[in-house]
Amino acid sequence: MGPPGLALLALLAAMGRCAPRDTLACSQGLACRLLEADVLCGPEAPGPGPGLVPARLRLEPALRCAGAAACAPCLRARLDLALGAAAGPPRAPPGDGDGAVAGILLLSGHAYSWSRCVAVEVRAPLRPGGTLGSVTFQCFEAALGSELRVTAYTNARGRPRLSRSRRVPDCSWPAAQAAVPQCRVPRLQVWRGPAVAVVQVQEAAAGHGYTLRLYHNRSRGAGAGRAVTASGPLNYSLPADEVLPCLCLQVWPEIQDPPRATSCPFSRDAEAWERLWARSRLLLHDAGDSLTCSVSAPCDLPAELVPCWRPEPAGPCQALPQLRQPLAAQGPQEFKALRPHPNLCVQARSGGQVRLTQCLRDRALPGRADDLLLLESRGPGGNASLCALERGACTPLASFTSTGAGRPGLLEPWLRQDVAAGQCAQVWRQENGTVAALWACPLHKYLHARWALAWMAALLCATCILLLLLLKQEDVKGWLKTLRAGCSPQGPARGRRALVLHAAEPSAERAACALAAALRPLGLAAAAAPGGGTAAAARGPLPWLHAQHRRALRGGDTVVLLLSPAAAAAARRWDRDDEDGGGDGPGGVEGPAACEAFAAALACVLPALAAGSGRYVVARLEAAVPAVPRALRAAPAFALPSQAPALLRALAGRGRRTEPQVARAAARLRRALAGGQ
């Protein structure tokens, strides 16, 4: 290096010093130092002889940091150096020794509103040809996203230059989002209350402003919404009626091309969806030969539109599934080939529920409310079928029944003729391999014919009844007598029987007689056992008793088990035998004669009672028998005389007409039992 170059080097060394935030690095074999971080580029004189020349310039994004989260984006300049061509052998600068070359490297950065030049002293070994090494300068700082142009050259003869342009990283660079304060997006939190929703903006960068925007996110474009600008933590309140599923929040810092954080916190809020459906409206438009509809709602609705047929204003709406279609996000929707009719409605269904319904009933359209909707299907062979649409099914006319339209099956030939003649209005038609059509056929013209058929049927029934009365006069008289007897206040239970089983002791016999006397006015015949008169004497008491029990089971009669002291003792022997594990009861009929017959009756009764066959009632004389033995507790039990009305109701049946007679019979039974005790 000659005297002018050394003088310039000394001047730059005296004037400049390395800024603390700039760094310089050299590859192995090079020696370099930063002379000045901000100099005026251009007045330096070229050095004599061969010198250093830039071979390659690269610009890389980097961060200049004063702290962990206090960084600024910049561009790092990496320059490869080579030895410039010269005539004659290379000469080392005086005092440097042989085999070395030195030079001054200048890096100039230019942005839109500023420029900066950096001077670097470089010493490299003298190796002809190839790259000597590289110098890395960090860094040129500029505004986020701005374009920066860097030029590199040395003081070698000819001063070749290299220039590159690149944009400084913006906040889309992942490394900048956490380290650059301007790129830090505030955090959103939403608190949902019963009457208000609060949007909280947290972790905003100190001293940097941000914008919070609230808008409705829809497929046809987000609404304008409203925006709030702040520079610190913020609590923004929303009334509950403004909370909708499509309400979204967006926040971003106030910088060029900022990153944005977006959240739609109410998209799964059930109350928000209910509020949205309540604010939505389904509108039908009569477009002449077709039916169109549209939905007015502040948000997109995930629903499908289903036309349906409603003959009655308050009745169900029969869906027409062939015509359903998804709800479009914008504009009216047309149901092709579906012609308007007063009974036509359109439903908006979502999640298996009918959310919105709108009908054409109030429009001035051809057709009547009592029209019947028929589906005609015609296959490739020309075979046509006709059925009526009702309750989600298509029912053939021959088996179709509707309370509002009588029996169309009787009118099937006339309806087919009306469809063929075009007297029914065609509501819809489709031709896709098979022909399908919907016809609205009026039924009012068939009302007179329907009533005529009804009158003829009634007259025929009356004639048959009169003829039957003439042929069966005597039988009718007998039936009327029986009916009068059955409805007479003298016997509400006439024709029914009761078998009273009791022990052969005086108190039981008196109670059995009193019970039979009380049941007789109620029309219920009572047979007491033991007893039977000549029949029992001829067959024997035990065979007669078993025959009476079988008859009661076959005839559905009620068996009354009257418990006196002897009868209760016989029943308790069954309890003891069950506790001892002894077979099917006592091995024989042992004990006093008063309970032998009753014990034999229990041998018939208890197996049937355990099997649940037959009708059994237990009546105990409460003064002598305090409790029902365990063997008989499966049957309803009544205490006499205190529960005499309940016992008689169980035997004669309940009813407003029988209650006075039961009350009188119970009073007589109480008196008879009280007199006999």
Image (cartoon, helix red, strand yellow):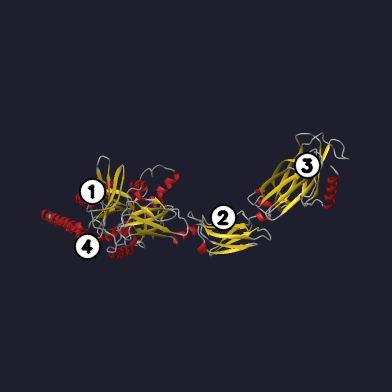
- Percent across and percent down for residue 156 are 78, 42
Say left or right for 141 vs 446.
Answer: right
- CA gap between label 1 and label 2 equals 60 Å
| Residue that numbered label 4 is attached to | 488
| Residue wearing tag 2 | 263
**Side of 34 where 319 appears, left or right:** left
Q: Earlier in the sequence, mark 1 or mark 2?
A: 2
Tell me whether the residue at label 1 lies in contact with that at label 2, contact meaning CB atoms closer than 8 angstroms.
no
| 625 left or right of 468 in image | right
Tell me which amino acid carries mark 2.
Answer: Ser
For the C terminus, the image quarter is bottom left
Q: Choose mark 2 or mark 4, whichever is in front.
A: 2
Residue occupied by mark 1: 398
Q: Residue at x 57, y 55 (%)?
A: 262
Mark pair 3, 2: CA separation = 61 Å
**Amino acid under disc 3:** Arg
Q: Quadrant of residue 457?
A: bottom left
Q: Residues within 10 Å of mark 1 (few under 14, many from 20)?
A: some
Amino acid beneath label 1: Ala
Image quadrant where residue 56 sits: top right
Q: How many marks?
A: 4
Q: Earlier in the sequence, mark 3 or mark 2?
A: 3
Residue closer to the observer: 393 or 434: 434
Of tags 3 and 1, the one toward the viewer is 3
Q: Which residue is mark 3?
A: 157
Residue 483 visible to an observer of this rendering:
yes
- Mark 3 vs mark 2, foreground winner is 3
Residue 649 horizontal/vertical position (percent): 31, 60
Circle nearer the N terminus (4, 3): 3
Label 1: which secondary element: helix
